[in-house]
Structures are given as structure tokens and as C-alpha cells.
Image (cartoon, rainbow, N blue to C red):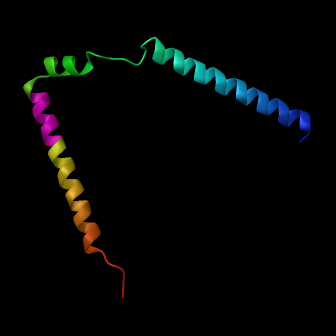
Amino acid sequence: MSEGIVILMIGVSTLLGALGLIGLLWGIKTGQFDDHSKFIDSARFDGEDALRDAVMMEEKKKKRHEKKKKDEKAYGPPD
């Protein structure tokens, strides 16, 4: 590759990175990523069945994690 192409590629990638950073900072400044009512609305509008299912899923996740830990402890390298 010639020097001119490498310089052009570096310049374009720097410009695109700067545009992405400016866009991200603009989004943060204007509050595009804020969702203050998300958790309140989910607690307010979820029914008992949905909450019960969430608890059951959390229990299953804990059991899988405990089983995985137990399996890892049971394995030992050969002597």
C-alpha cells in the first residue's frame, strides 16, 4: 500500500470515530438514554403471574449456578 492510502484510511477512521464520540456525548447530554419510569412502570403493570414467573426463573438460575460450581469442584486434574 502506498503512503497516501494509509494516511487517507487513518484520517477517515479518525473522522468517523470522532463523529461517533460526538453523537454519544450529544445523546448523553440530551438525555436520550434516560428512562426514569422503566422500573416503576414494570413494577406497577406486571401481574402476579409475571412476577411469580420471574421469581421461578431466578431460582432456576441460582440452581444452575450452584450445580455448575459443584461440577467444577468435583473435577480434578489427573495425578
Q: Nearer the viewer, residue 54 or 40?
A: 40
Span shown in magenta? 49-57
Measured along the vertical axis of the image, is residue 28 above or below residue 74? Answer: above
Q: In the drawing, does residue 55 fall left or right of residue 4?
A: left
Residue at x-position 13% and y-position 41%: 56
Q: Residue at x 16, y 22 (%)?
A: 43
Which x, y percent locates residue 38? 26, 19
Where in the figure is residue 34, as x and y percent of width and height?
36, 17
Q: Is residue 51 magenta?
A: yes
Q: Residue furthest bottom?
A: 79
- Expressed as whole percent of the image width and height from the top left, the position of residue 24 reads 53, 21
Q: Say whether residue 20 is left or right of residue 56.
A: right
Identify the main secondary structure in magenta.
helix
Q: Residue at left 17%, top 48%? A: 60
Which quarter of the image is occupied by the N terminus? top right
Quarter of the image holding residue 64? Answer: bottom left
Residue 66 among those drawn in magenta: no
Q: Looking at the rendering, which quadrant does residue 68 occupy? A: bottom left
Left or right: 64 in relation to 35: left
Extreme left residue here? 48
